[in-house]
Each structure stands twice: as C-alpha cells, then as structure tokens.
Image (cartoon, helix red, strand yellow):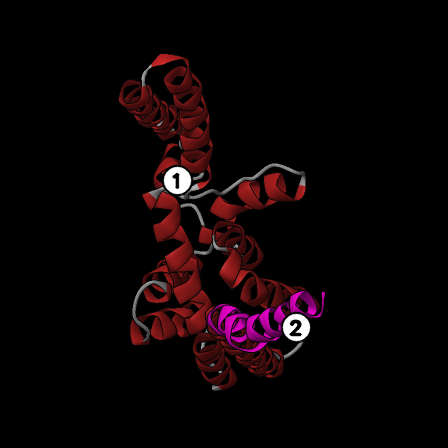
Amino acid sequence: MPAAIGLPVPRRARWGGVLARARAGGRGWEAPAARAGPSVGGGRGRRRRASLAVGAGAGAALLLGGVVGVVVGALTTAGTYWWSARMPSPVDRRAALEEDHLARQLPLGAELLAACLGSAASPSAAVSAVGRSLGAPIGPRLVALGGELALGAPPELCWTRLGEQHPALAPLARCLVRTSLGGVPVAGPLVGLAQAQRSAAARSARAGVRRAGVFATAPLGLCFLPAFVLIGVVPVVIGLTARFTQGM
C-alpha cells in the first residue's frame, strides 16, 4: 500500500471532479482571472470622475460669479459627471478593441481548425497548431487552450469557458461544444461558421458605408438649405412684399 502513494494520477481522473462540479452547476475549472476578487478600479474611477466634475463646476462658478455662477457650476458639475460616467474607460476601450480583433480572426481560425481536425489531428494538436499560426489576440488563447486539452481537460468545459471570457469567440465555442457532445464531424460546421461570420461582417461593412453616406450628406444639406432660402425664397418674398406695399 505505501508504494501506491507515489503512483501518478491519470490525467482524465484529475479532471473527473472538475467536470462533475461543472455539470452540477458549479464553475469548476476557471481561469485565474475569473477567480480573482472584485476589482478596485471602479472606486478609483468614480473618485476621478467626481474630482473632474467638481473642478469643472468650481471653475464655471468662479468664472461667472454670483447666483448665476452657482447655478451654472452645479449644472456643470452634474453634466460633467454624467458625461464622464458614460465615457468608456481605457480598460473598456482596450477590451472592446480586442474583441473586435478576435471577431475578425474568427473566420480564418475556424477554417484552419476545420482543416487540421479534418486531417485526423488530435484536438489538442490542432488547436495548438492553429494558435501558433495565428497572431494575437486569438493565437495565444488557442495555444493555452491546446495545452489544457493536452493535459486532459474536458473539451466541452474548455470551449465553454473560452466563449464566456470572450463573447466574440462564443460562436466558435458553441459550435465545437455541439459537435463534441453530438459526436458529428466538426469540419463542416466550422466551415459553415466561417462563411456565416464573413457574411455578417460584409453586411455590417455595407451598413457602415450607408451610414457614412448619410452622415456625409447631412452637413452638405445644412449648408445648401440656408443658401437656397436666401437666394431663392427671400428675394421672392421681398418682391411680393414690395408690390403689395406699392399697391396699397
């Protein structure tokens, strides 16, 4: 019996408890960032916004002075705090930019995964190879996930966690989870996912071009409308008014 203490635990056995807890409703295996405590950046952000709002309001009150200055300062403080609260923080902007890059890399990554898995490569080797062939931000994440799969992590749990952490990769995660649970070949669904993502990106680009056209013609219309009124309408009104006054 003492000799059994040094025996290595099988890789699948190490993940058995994790998968059982995940199916029971717990999160089981989580990334270190997901287990971290609450962020303290929110309190600093609120204090920074409050300081900015108070400074802007005090400046407006001192500039105008009197009761008007107090009223304008209070309104400036409230408006500045509301505006700064609606503005995304640098962390949020970086996260949104990263999600946009992930969405752009998703079609190519899905096609490469379909090619690797269709050539009878193991899931861990396929994911790692695709991750090494793609750049950031999707490449390092796939390499890390391939390492977890090589250690015996449950594929369904790994892909689900990836989709929860990065919403842009949620379609890929759902596709791989469905194919893994259903036991169907994964190459076809991955190619279909890549085509659907490219079609959605093309539709979004066309909609953006149409919106840009509307926004570009709006200032032009605002410039031509007063000119039309001054050149075409005002002289007619003046002429009719002059004739009316002469007739009287």
Which residue is found at the position 54% from the left and 73% from the top?
214
Residue type, mark 1 in image: Ala
Q: Which residues are magenta?
A: 221-248
- The residue carrying mark 2 is 243
Q: Which class describes the residues within 10 Å of circle 2: few (<14), some (14-19), or many (20+)? A: few
What number of labels is visible?
2
- The residue carrying mark 1 is 33
Q: Is residue 19 above or below residue 179?
A: above
Q: Nearer the viewer, residue 86 or 132?
A: 86
User: What is the quadrant of the N terminus in the image?
Assistant: top left
Q: Nearer the viewer, residue 89 or 164?
A: 89
Q: What is the CA distance from the residue labelled 1 to the residue labelled 2? A: 81 Å
Q: Is residue 57 above or below residue 28?
A: above
Q: Is residue 28 above or below residue 164?
A: above
Local SS, label 2: helix
Say whether residue 175 is visible: yes
Which residue is found at the position 53% from the left and 50% from the top?
164
Residue type, mark 2 in image: Arg
Q: Nearer the viewer, residue 224 or 38?
A: 224
Which residue is found at the position 45% from the left and 25% from the top?
75
Q: Nearer the viewer, residue 199 or 130?
A: 199
- Horizontal and vertical percent position of residue 207: 57, 75
User: In the figure, is residue 15 to the left or right of 144?
Assistant: right
Q: Looking at this rendering, what residue extends furthest in the top direction?
A: 66
